[in-house]
Amino acid sequence: MRKILLIYTGGTIGMITNAQTGALESFDFAHLYAHIPELKRFELEIEVRSFSTPLDSSEIGPVHWQQIASWIAKSYEQFDGFVILHGTDTMAYTASALSFMLQGLKKPIVFTGSQLPIGIIRTDGKENLITAIEIAAATDETGEPVLQEVAVYFEYALFRANRCSKVSAHQFEAFASPNYPLLAKAGVQIEWFKERLFRTQLIHLDPLLDLNSDVLIWRLYPGMPVHLYAPALRFPTVQILILETFGAGNAFSDKAFQELIKAFITAGGLVLNITQCQSGPVRQGAYQTSMFFERIGVISGADLTAEAAITKAMFALAYIPKNQQAAFLKANIVGELTALP
């Protein structure tokens, strides 16, 4: 019998209606089978572990990412798969972080949640949870896990964790992965797209749980008052600046802005260029307005999501030698970006 560890961190999925008061309150996942008897039909052993205090995902950050990753690393040999129940707002950040922190992964880690509480009649939470568990338990013809990476399952779609973002606050189709296709689609059966699945070249799980948050992200916009932002950009207080630029990696040619970026790089900082667009990569130097970046050594982030860029930068600062960080940020480590020719 395959064993699944279910980790509940908080979020909308964990709410149920109190029969006496009608109010929503936290779901007791210790009584999982009583509330979702359908799970008894799986030939699985499911163990539940919960945060002592369930958290709205807006409150979850690197210290909690470390806690989740640590629980998985310590329980890795005891379980065949892992399902993380998490609020949707920052799910893509947590899931992306774990993809870097748990390299060498050969078992499934599936994040899921819901837009409506599990105690609401029209909830999407029950289906998301049941299918996430089924995915985490799935094996191929050799008995190996079909999924061997961190993924997000939501509304019939399985996404690579470090390729997806939350795109809707009110629709059940809350997540999208514009730059990488689905890993699987749940219909009458689960349809796997096996050629898209990530496989590590490492032999063993390598839990690397430290992170360095000396990262700043700026979303550029027309008329941006650069002088208001300048005091925040000081190396080494900030070590990596992520710029969310226009289109294929373009920016305005404001001299104060260019001097600020150049001075930061000269001082030892790294600048990573990602696009504000939902789909498509940065092509630095393709247009006149991004040639300045190419000249001064700004790093092209290709088609990284903002969530993957931030968590990858935090990981790089914690583990990668300074003279190798730029190359690391440009490289495809765990399937998070498409390397450009």
Image (cartoon, grey):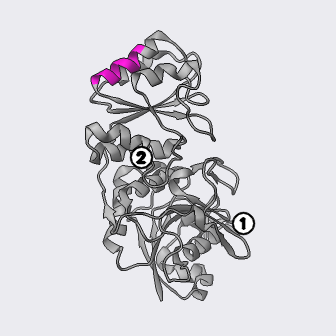
Residue under the image location 51 percent in, 41 percent down: 306
| Residue 24 shows up from this direction | no
Based on the picture, tell me whether residue 264 belongs to the magenta stretch.
yes
On screen, residue 232 above or below 152: above
- Say which residue label 1 marks: 122
* Label 2 to label 1: alpha-carbon separation: 34 Å
**303 or 55, which lies in front?**
303
Q: Is residue 287 left or right of residue 74?
A: right
Picture quadrant where residue 16 is located: bottom right
Residue type, label 1:
Arg
Picture quadrant where residue 112 is located: bottom right
Residue under the image location 39 percent in, 63 percent down: 201
- Say which residue label 2 marks: 311
Residue type, label 2:
Thr
Magenta-tinted stretch: 259-267
Look at the numbered disc 2 and give the secondary structure of its residue.
helix
Based on the picture, tell me whether residue 339 belongs to the magenta stretch.
no
Name the N-terminal-most of marks 2 and 1: 1
Residue 137 location, x and y as percent? 52, 78
Per the picture, the main secondary structure of the magenta-coloured stretch is: helix
Disc 1 crowd rating (10 Å Cα; few below 14, some 14-19, many 20+) is few
